[in-house]
Amino acid sequence: MRRGVLAVYQVLLLVLLFAAWHVLVKLEVLSAFFFGEPLQVLARIWEWFASGRIYPHLGITLLETLLAFVIGTLAGLVVGLWLALSDTASRLLDPYIKAVNSMPRVILAPIFAVWFGLGIWSKVVLGVTLVFFIVFFSVYHGVREVSPVLLANARMLGASKRQLLRHVYLPSATAWVFASLHAAVGMAFVGAVIGEYLGSAKGVGYLILQAEGVFDVNTVFAGVLVLTLCALVLDWIVTLAERRLLRWRPAGPGAAQS
Amino acid sequence: MSPQPALALHRVSCRFDARGGGTYVAIEDVSLSVAEGEFVAIVGPTGCGKSTLLNVAAGLLAPTAGAVRVFGEPLLGLNRRAGYLFQTDALLPWRSVRDNVRLGLELRGETDADRLADDWLARVGLGGHGHKYPHELSGGMRKRVALAQTLALDPKMLLMDEPFSALDVQTRALMENELLALWSQDRKSVLFVTHDLEEAISLSDRVVVLSAGPASRPVGEFAIDLPRPRDVSEIRLQPRFVELEQTIWQALKREVLRTYQRAEA
């Protein structure tokens, strides 16, 4: 299917889903109280943006997400490279990494709130703990699987350890980082919103919590939709950066995916 | 010819810890030398430790026993005077062709890297392809890039590990002729590993036959007295070539059969 045609069908599918939702609620197959009404959800989103009421909340949530995303990615990249290249460190820390990764970290959100306060930092930390491991594992395994022939060749051409890091390991890790960034974007949002949900005075998560308190399901869906759109935009930016930085990759099923 | 050989392996052995316990002896008691300006080909059945031998000569692998000398000096660490052409692709996929050829020069801190890289690209016939990425090239073209990348550093000796084995027959003959043409310009010492006897004879001054693995060692050495310059497709038709091929094949066949017998046992 051509790209333009595909986009039309994608939009059509979205309209169809909303129409189905609308009809099912109107026919009272689904209860409007529990499932909301799409028109009112859209009206709420419109009202938010028209009155500008959403901007301070959205701004906070986006700031938390971006901070969590950037800090978590950089930390994952650096620690992933370090552990992949240092056998001693990776063997020493292996059980700890696994333990922390399998820990249900979302549960720690209230503790982060106590440690870092109710401002943005407790949310950023929660997001970082989610993003970090995705990027970390990706880089760690990626670097360990760098072709030995590539390394041997670079060494025969005179590369020192440092030059190997710069010219072989780092570029090859970059490819792996991008593979994980799409998953990481979503996780950064999860961290920010869950954090707000559990204790904050601002942010889209806070709006959703307020609405749930008064059983205003339309506003809950409106908040979720706005966040989803933001996540899609961020994912799209990642894709653009990926295309630019990984131009050297052959166009194949992998490249077409995103 | 200088009295010191460019490369001398003296009673070199390599053992590895085998997966299921015990040790695997890849090569045992190998003595071999390559004179300055000499083109030596090593042939042997599959799995006879040919690559191990090259890795020892490159200094990528330290032998378990024995000594390696490069121009008379004992080899410690990597062999800085050698260029290595690998069997599989070793180009950095994220660098353009030109930047790949530049790589060694850049690592060395060469100020004239750009000009030298372009120069070498032109010499291997890839003048207009510098901006492309490796995946956009054919297998033969990638081999040319690898050759340019290695030769740009002007190594004193070349180690080649079945470099053309993945190419189709026609491309292969072209590459062999090109290699000979480049080699004849400054006659580096070459250690060329292959399982293709015809390739070995048509390129080299001397063919060394390696025994079947494990514990491979040289079992025969044959001087190739064919005149140079050679054309690899034409030289194969000469009576002397056929004669040499038959003689060496007798020695090689025994080893190949031994490999089969071991595989079946």
Image (cartoon, coloured by chain):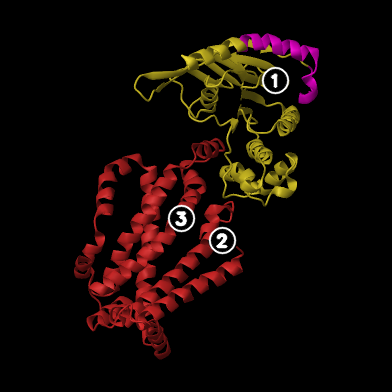
The red-coloured chain is labelled A
Magenta span:
B227-252
Q: Are marks 3 and 1 in contact (CB under 8 Å)?
A: no
Quick check: do tags 2 and 3 share a chain?
yes
Classed neighbour count for the residue bearing mark 1: other residues with Cα under 10 Å, few (<14), some (14–19), many (≥20)? some
Label 3 sits on a secondary structure element that is: helix
CA gap, disc 2 and disc 3:
14 Å
The amino acid on which the numbered mark 3 sits, given as a three-letter code, is Ala
Is residue A81 visible from the viewing direction of this image? Answer: no
Q: Which residue is mark 1?
A: B198
CA gap, disc 1 and disc 2:
46 Å
Q: Which mark is residue A179?
A: 3
Q: Which mark is residue A244?
A: 2
Quadrant location, the N terminus of chain A:
bottom right
A163 to A10, vertically: above or below: above
Q: What residue is at 74 percent from the left and 43 percent from the top?
A: B122
The yellow-coloured chain is labelled B
Residue A117 location in percent, x, y? Answer: 22, 72
- The residue at the far bottom in this view is A51
